[in-house]
Image: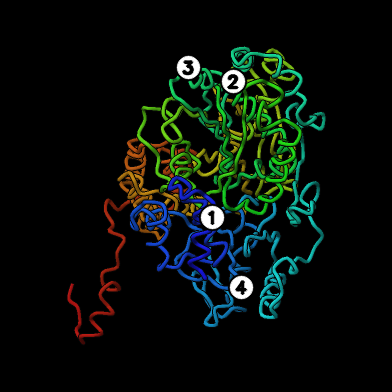
Amino acid sequence: MIENKIQKILDKFNRDKTRLMDILLHIQSEIGYIPQTLIQPIADGIDLSAADVLQTISFYHFFTLKPRGKYTIYLNNSIVAYMMGREKVAKVFEEECGCKFGEVTEDGLIGLFDTACIGMSDQEPAALINGKVFTNITTFRAREIIRDMKQGRKVEEMFATTFGDGKNASPLIRTIVRNRMKRTGPVLNMSYKAGNTLLKQVAQMTPKEVINEVKLSHLRGRGGAGFPTGLKWEFCRRASGEKKFVFCNADEGEPGTFKDRVILTEKPEMLFEGMTIAGYAIGAKEGILYLRYEYMYLKKYLEDVLDRLRKNNQLGPNTANIKGFDFDIRIQFGAGAYVCGEESALIESSEGKRGEPRNRPPFPVEKGYLDYPTVVNNVETLCSVVRIIQNGGDWYRSLGTEESTGTKVLSVSGDCRYAGIYELEWGFTVSDILEMAGAENTLAVQVGGPSGALIGPDDFNRTLCYSDLATGGSFIIFNESRDILRDVVMNFTEFFIDESCGSCVPCRNIPTLLKHKLEKILQGHGTEKDITDIKEWGNMMQINRCGLGHTAANPVLTSLKNFRHLYEDKIQKTVEFDSGIDLAEAVAESCEFVDRIPKF
C-alpha cells in the first residue's frame, strides 16, 4: 500500500531527481515521516543513489526518518520567544506530556521538539503543531493543548481564539496569526490593484525599457547585500542560455524577521506580478517562489491565487497578451534550513540537494538553477518593482536618500508596545523606530537579525541606509532588564552553530569555540586573552564561502565592539591564564569509581 503511494508521488513529479524536495515533502505529509525502508525505492525511482537521498533528508530540520508523534509540537526557541515566556511554556509541555524536548511520548502520541524562528516574533511564544501555527502561547494554553491532544481532538479544533485579521481568516488559510501591519508606505499601501501594471504598462514596454526603468530607480536588493536590481536583471538577460529563471527568495529564516509572512498573506498578487515583470525583463519562462517550510499553512491560499492569475491571463500562454511570453510560477517549499536564505544554497535546495552555498564565480545570473541564468530577488524587492513600473523610476528615486532610494519594510519585535511591520522611507534613525514602536528604557537593538549588528544607545541616532546602518529587516529591541551576554549573544551563537551547513571549516568550528569562550567568561574564568581570542577567531569567519558564514560570529563580535564593558566586568583582571577547568571536579566521578584520591 505504502509502496503504491510512493510510486504515485514519484510519477506526480515525473520521476525527476531535481524535484526530490517535493517528493520527500509529499511522502512525509502522507506517512508522517520518511521510513528508512523507503530510501532505496525512492533512489531507484529517480535514478539517484540511496546516499544522495539520505544526505538531502539529513540536511533539513523538518525531515525525519522516525515517527515524531501523532501530534508533533515544534516550539520556537528564538530569543524573542524566551523574552516572552518560552521557558515556562516549555516546562509545562514537558510536565503534561511526561517527556523532554527531543523526545516522543511512550505511546507515540506527542512529540516535543525545538525549532528556530518560525516567523512569528511579533506574537511569541509560538509553535507549529502538525503544520498549524499557535501564537501567544501561555502556560495555561499549553495545558489546554496537551489536554486536547490526549482527548484526540483535531489540531484545527484546538484554537482558542478567532482567526487572524485580513486574509488570515480566509477559508484557505484559517489561522490565528495576526498581521500586525503598523505602518504602510508608498509600496505596500492600499492603492495597489492586482495586475494593472502588468496588463496596462508592461505590455506596452520592451524588456530593455523595463530594465532601464528599474535601473533608473536605483532599487537595490532588500535581502541584505544591496546589489542593484536593474543591473542584476541586465546581466541575466545578456547571459547565454536556452532557458532563464526568476526566483523569489521567501526563505526569511533570520530570527526576528516576519515581513514576508505579512506580504505573502495580504499582497501575494503584487509579489507574483513582480516576478512576472522580472521574467519578462530577463526572458524567462518560469518563476519559482522558494518558500520556507514554516509557511506551509499558506500553500492552498497561494496556489489558489496563482490559479486565479492564470484565469485572468496574468500567467500562462501569452501572459498579459504579450505574444510569445509564456510565463508561469510554481512554489518550492524548503524543509527548515537557515542557510537556504543564501541565493546559491536556495538554488541547490530547489534542485533537490543539500542547501550548501556554491563557490562563486560563476554567479547565479550566469549559471544558476539547473545551470541556466537565474535572477534571485526577495519578496520586498519584487513588490517594489511593481510600483516602480507603475509610477516610474524617477518617482521611486525621489523616496529615501540619494544612496538608498525607496522604502524599507521592518519587522519590529522585542521589548516594545507595538511590535509589527513598519514600511518607511530609507533615512530614518534607530530612535525613530524606538519611538514609533513604543520602546522604553532600551538597552540594545539587534539590527538585521543575528547576522547584523547589536548596537547600544550611542548608535541610536544612526541612520538606517546602505551607507550607514544597513538591515535586511529584522529589528529586535532589548530593554534594561535583559542580560545581553547570557541571554541574547548566547542564543544567537547557538543559533548559528545549529544552522551551519558545515561546508566550511571556520563556520563548522569557530562559532562553537566562541560559545565556549563566552561560557568561560560568564562562569568567571575569563581573562583578557579570551577577549583577544574572540576577536581574532571571529575575524577568521571571512574565509567562509558564503555571506551567512561571514556573519556567523557577528553576535559575539558586535557585542564585544559595542558592549565591551560587559565582557570586561566579568573577566579576571590580575590573571593571565585560566583553563576554565576545575580539575578536581572533572576527575571526581572517575576517582570515586576506582576508589582513588587524586593528588595535584
Pick the front one: 248 or 195:
195
Judging by the rendered image, the residue that carries numbered circle 3 is 238
Q: Is residue 320 left or right of residue 51?
A: right
- x, y percent for residue 28: 53, 62
Left or right position of 93 against 584: right
Q: CA distance from mark 2 to mark 3?
A: 11 Å
Residue 309 horizontal/vertical position (percent): 72, 36
At horizontal 54% and vertical 52% (from top left) the residue drawn is 12
Q: Look at the numbered discs 2 and 1 and tell me whether their residues touch, using CB distance below 8 Å.
A: no
Viewer-proximal residue, 283 or 80? 283
Image: 534 above or below 186: below
Circle 1 packing at 10 Å, graded few (<14), some (14-19), many (20+), is: many
* Residue behind mark 1: 116
Q: Is residue 484 visible?
A: no
Work out whether mark 4 precedes mark 2 in sequence or the reverse, and give the earlier one.
4
Crowding at label 3, few (<14), some or many (≥20) Cα neighbours within 10 Å?
A: few
Judging from the image, what secondary structure is the residue with disc 1 in? loop
Q: Which residue is mark 2?
A: 281
Pick the front one: 580 or 277: 277
Residue 320 lies, in percent from the top left, at 71, 25
Q: What's the distance in space between the residues labelled 2 and 1, CA to CA?
A: 36 Å
Closer to the observer: label 2 or label 1? Answer: 2
In front of the other: label 4 or label 2?
Answer: 2
Marks 3 and 1 sit apart, C-alpha to C-alpha, by 39 Å
